[in-house]
Image: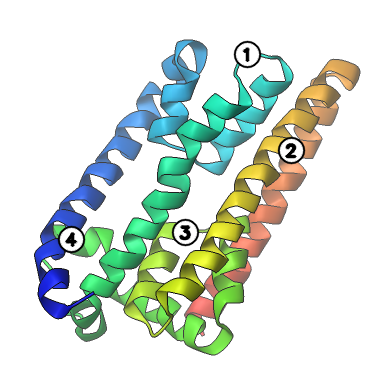
Amino acid sequence: MTTAKRARLRTPLLVLAGVRTILGIVAIPLAPALYEDHFVLLVLLRPTKEVLLAGGFLLRRHEVALPVLLAAAIPLAIFGVWHFYFLGRAYSKEIRSGKGLPNWASKILPPKRIKALSDILDKKGTRVVFLGRLAAFPSALMAAAAGASDMSRREFLVADGLGGLLSIAEVLIAGYAFGAAYKRAGPWLTGVGIAALAVLLVLMGRWLRRQEAK
């Protein structure tokens, strides 16, 4: 991408990221109602691990179709994160210097966090991108850090794409399995399984945050 083309895309990319953030926040208070009557719309607005875990549970009960669920999840869960890679690349100078970003934009692209993640990527490479997808960790910030660092587009897209797809499969399968456990053994076993998965994801996320703090 040429410098001129990158400059033309900067503002639209940033505005789109702001819109995405707002929609994700709006989906939170609407989640109970959307879960009951418009679950696919909830996935479309907020394809987080907890929402997709519920999606796996609903798959087991035949209340949602897998192709529809994937079609709703992939736009933001995969391409939405890739958008932040190009956003990080477009604003790499501002992120590295910590200057030049509007105040509202620094909420979307916090320079200190992104620079810390960029340092991790420089040391550990694409495996951190891949593992970050499987953990309870903000993938959008990792993508922005990859864009702001020296990681090539091909390296990032391959690592993040594989990690993102595996992450979706991970929680859908877990939700499906928990649904089967609920039917056979009731809510206690299901609750223990969900708690164990949550702990695993959080521990992986904490490991990444410790690397970020070093």
Q: CA distance from mark 4 to mark 3?
A: 17 Å
N-term-proximal mark, 1 vs 3: 1
In the image, farthest residue toward the bottom: 123
Of circles 1 and 4, the one toward us is: 1
Q: CA distance from mark 1 to mark 4?
A: 39 Å
Kind of residue at disc 1: Glu
User: Please, what secondary structure does the residue beneath circle 3 have?
Assistant: helix
Of circles 1 and 2, the one toward us is: 1
User: Please, what secondary structure does the residue beneath circle 4 have?
Assistant: helix
Q: Tell me whether the residue at label 4 lies in contact with that at label 2, contact meaning CB atoms closer than 8 angstroms.
A: no
- Residue at position x 43%, y 26% from top? 42
Kind of residue at disc 4: Ala
Q: Quadrant of residue 147?
A: bottom left
Of circles 1 and 3, the one toward us is: 1
Question: If the image is split into quadrants, where does the N terminus sit?
Answer: bottom left
N-term-proximal mark, 4 vs 3: 4
Q: CA distance from mark 1 to mark 3?
A: 29 Å
User: Please, what secondary structure does the residue beneath circle 1 have?
Assistant: loop
Q: How many marks?
A: 4
Number of the label disc, if any, that sits on residue 139: 3
Q: Position of residue 35 (x, y in %)?
A: 50, 18
Dot 1: within a 10 Å radius of its alpha carbon, few (fewer than 14), some, or many (20 or more) residues?
Answer: few
Is 73 positioned to the left or the right of 187 in the image? Answer: left
Q: CA distance from mark 1 to mark 2?
A: 16 Å
Q: CA distance from mark 4 to mark 2?
A: 36 Å
Q: Which residue is mark 2?
A: 174
Q: Tell me whether the residue at label 1 lies in contact with that at label 4, contact meaning CB atoms closer than 8 angstroms.
A: no
Q: Position of residue 37 (x, y in %)?
A: 47, 10
- Residue at position x 48%, y 65% from top? 157
- Residue at position x 22%, y 71% from top? 90
Q: Which residue is mark 1?
A: 63
Using the rendered image of the protein, determine whether residue 135 is visible from the camera's viewpoint: no
